[in-house]
Each structure stands twice: as C-alpha cells, then as structure tokens.
Image: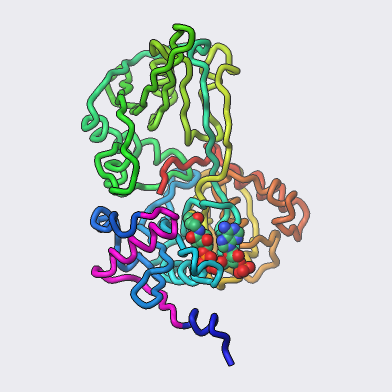
Amino acid sequence: MLSPAILRLMDIDVRTITDDEVAAWSAGASTGFLNPVGDVDAEARRPDLVLDRTWGAFDGDTVVATLRSFRSQTTVPGGGALEASAVTAVTTTSTHRRRGLASRLVAGELAASVERGEQVSVLIAAEWGIYGRFGYGASTEHQTWMVDALAAQVRHRPQGTVEYVDRDTARALAPEVYERHRSKRPGEISRPDYFWDIDFGILRYPSWPEPKPSFYVLARDPARLVTGVARYSYEEKWEHRQPKGQVTVRLFLTDDPAAEALLWHHLLTLDLTASVRVEDRPADELLPLLLTDARHAQPSGRADFLWIRPLDVAGMLACRSYLVSGQIVLEVVDSAGLAGGRFALDGGPDGASCARTTASPDLTVDAATLGSAYLGGYRVRSLAAAGLVDEHSTSAVARADAMFRSPVTPWCTTWF
Ligand SMILES: CC(C)(COP(=O)(O)OP(=O)(O)OC[C@H]1O[C@@H](n2cnc3c(N)ncnc32)[C@H](O)[C@@H]1OP(=O)(O)O)[C@@H](O)C(=O)NCCC(=O)NCCS
C-alpha cells in the first residue's frame, strides 16, 4: 500500500499553465521566493510569460512549484552563438519542498527544450548545490570591485567624451552597445527587449523595491559613436566635514577598452566621492591595470554566475572555435539520458566539427562538467585535478585543456 505522502505527490500535476492560471502561478513563484505578496505581480508579469514555457506544479488549484524559460542565445568562443533556453523562476513552496517537484519541473523543461532543438539550457543558480544533479555546470564567473576614488587615478584618459543624458536616451542606446559587446564575449546571452526596461526602472513588478534615482552617462569615441553606457546612484556622506560620498554603479556597459577607461575616468573624478562600487564585473577585469596604482581597486565576491546544461553535445562542440587545433573523443555521461554518448571533436581556431563515434574515448565527463568546461571559464586541467574528468589516453587532459581555453574570458552580465 502506498503511503499518504506518496499518494499526495501523485496527485500533483506538473504541466505548463494556461492564461487564466497566471495569477496562481505568480502567487506560487512569490511564495517560493519567500516574498509574501501573493499574486500582485501577475498583471506585470504577463507580458514576460510564454505560456508553453511556463511550468507549474498544481496541488488542486494552488501552484506549489514553478519554472519558466525564454528563448535566448549564448555567445561562444569564436563569436558563434548557441540556441539556448534560459530558465528562471524555479521555486517550490516550503510546504512541498524535497518531494521531487523541482526535479519534475526541470525534467519537463529539459525534455521540451530538446524537442525545441535548443542546444543548451542556461540558468543562474541561487545556491551551488541545486542544479549539478540536473546536468548543469557553472561556466562563467563575476566579481565586485570597490575603488578608493580619492586615491585612484586612471593612467591615461583616452580620447572621446562622456556626457550626461536622460534615462530614455540611455535606454534607447544601451541595447546597441550591448549587442556589439555580446557578440565578442563568450557567456553573454541575448536579452528580450523588456529586460532593458527592467534594467532602467521603466518596467517594475509591484513587489520590487523602487529603483534608486540614477545618473546616466554615455561614452563616445572620437567619431562620436556611443561605445559605453553607465548608470549610477550617489549616496551623500560626510565625516568631520570631509566628503565621503559613495557611488554605486548599477550598469557599466562598454564595447571597447577605451570606453572602459573613459567611464572609469569619469567615475573616479566625481566630486564629493570617496568610493565607487560596481558589481557583476568579469573575472578578467581591466580596471586595476587602468590605474596608476592597481591596489586602489579591491575585488571581492568572486563567484559562479551562468550555468550551462548541454543538450545537443555535437552541435555545441561544433559551434565554438578552439584555441589550438586538436582532436578529442569525448564520452559524455548523462544520467537523464538527454545528452550522453561518445563524440569525436576535431577543432581549431578556425572552427570545428563534431559527430557521434564508436571510437575509444580519450576523456569521460558528465554533462555538468562539460557545461563547466565548454566556454573555457573553468579549465579542463582544474576540473580533472578535482576528479571530475577521467583520462583514458596519454596527455588527453593536457590536449583538451589547451583546446578548450578561450582567448576571451567568459562573462555574463544578464540577471534573469
Ligand atoms: C531549490 C528548490 C526549488 C528545490 O525544490 P524542491 O522541490 O525541494 O527540489 P527537489 O525535491 O526536486 O530536490 C531534488 C534534489 O535536490 C536537492 N536539493 C534541492 N534544493 C537543494 C539545495 N538548495 N541545496 C542542495 N540540494 C538541494 C534535494 O535534497 C533533492 O536531493 P535528493 O534527490 O538526493 O533527495 C526549493 O528549495 C526552493 O524553492 N528554494 C527557494 C527558491 C530558490 O532558491 N530557487 C532556485 C532559484 S535558482
């Protein structure tokens, strides 16, 4: 005889939602994120929700677990882009947690993603321990910088201008800068247009805090092309009649190093400002090297950001270029049965081909480890040293390590 707990679980229906279930879904997502607002966000959320990508677990009429996704593209080394499903709003209400509901939702979404022909699924993990079991691996990192603005000096101010603009002007120009930046940076994802409205505080869910009043600046190169956009807020502070104001940079977007130097020069020459803080910066941040004294900029909070779940292994391996030419036979183990198999990769700086093979493998990895190695943000040799890669032929780890490195450090700036 089945226990009452198992019978209750069998009663819970996991499926995509219909239009008239958006309010219940929204209430479920809020409760899952411990935000006691009920369905107040439902109307605001509606334009973002693609119903056949919006999953709910129903206990009667109550949505007790949620997940949704949107179509996106993820830039890879060499400048190509993968078809990706960007997964978000994964929640289970506390009364229903640890009964396998998130697992059922993720399994449903991943199967649908394969059906749609998406090559990877991507997400940002609230906690490290949640998604590895589903085949996702951490693939990009980000970090925070705090700069002593009274001491820091930009070594060389490139030619170009920085100008204040209003919010709507910055919002209109930011996507173009982002698109140029995204095409060059592995790990960046394409953004639905409404993300910009959220970023600039134009679109807001009712339960979200009021955005801080901000300044908007543009960097222009000598040809007047907009190459950078920043948004920052200022908090006034005084100590012993000395100005100790704090600037928090909420958007720092550039598509070339000169624009970075121009924007930093602007931020570090603001009057009444003792510190400048900026989050979500890349692991290969340029800032310290732009300063006359690198130690006036202090990094902190380096952490994983974008996680990748391989789905179409041959397609994704063929999509990127490789730092050095080489061949590797890779055995991918996938307990979910979505991406497993043996793949022969032949790749180099100009591109790659990859197909299923029956040849003996050089390396065995699980799907999550391939997700971590794929963009080159986590080195194959480090993953191997940590026991996550099995080597079957001499120097295969060294060969894969050299191939999978990326000339541009992976970075994702998009919260979703
Ligand atoms: C994370 C969350 C969605 C998990 O939902 P859930 O329905 O309890 O998950 P499942 O029951 O399917 O768990 C599957 C497995 O993952 C494990 N797991 C779940 N959450 C975990 C966590 N935070 N850390 C480590 N392991 C976790 C479970 O223990 C279970 O392992 P088992 O199969 O060995 O028993 C849920 O706890 C939640 O809503 N948390 C708050 C919101 C949040 O952080 N969402 C993630 C946004 S990225």
The reply to whether the magenta stretch includes residue 12 is yes
Q: Position of residue 57 (x, y in %)?
A: 41, 72
Residue sitting nearer the eye, 207 or 153: 207
Residue sitting nearer the eye, 288 or 201: 201
**On the rendered image, what quadrant is the N terminus found in?**
bottom right
16 sits to left or right of 310: left
Name above or below for residue 64 compared with residue 40: below
Q: Position of residue 389 (x, y in %)?
A: 70, 56
Q: Position of residue 353 (x, y in %)?
A: 52, 57
Residue sitting nearer the eye, 206 or 250: 206
Seen at 52% across and 24% down, the residue is: 146
Counting every numbered tag in the picture gives: 0
| Residue 155 in view in this figure | no
Seen at 47% across and 26% down, the residue is: 277
Seen at 50% across and 48% down, the residue is: 306
Name above or below for residue 21 compared with residue 259: below
Q: Which residues are magenta?
A: 11-36
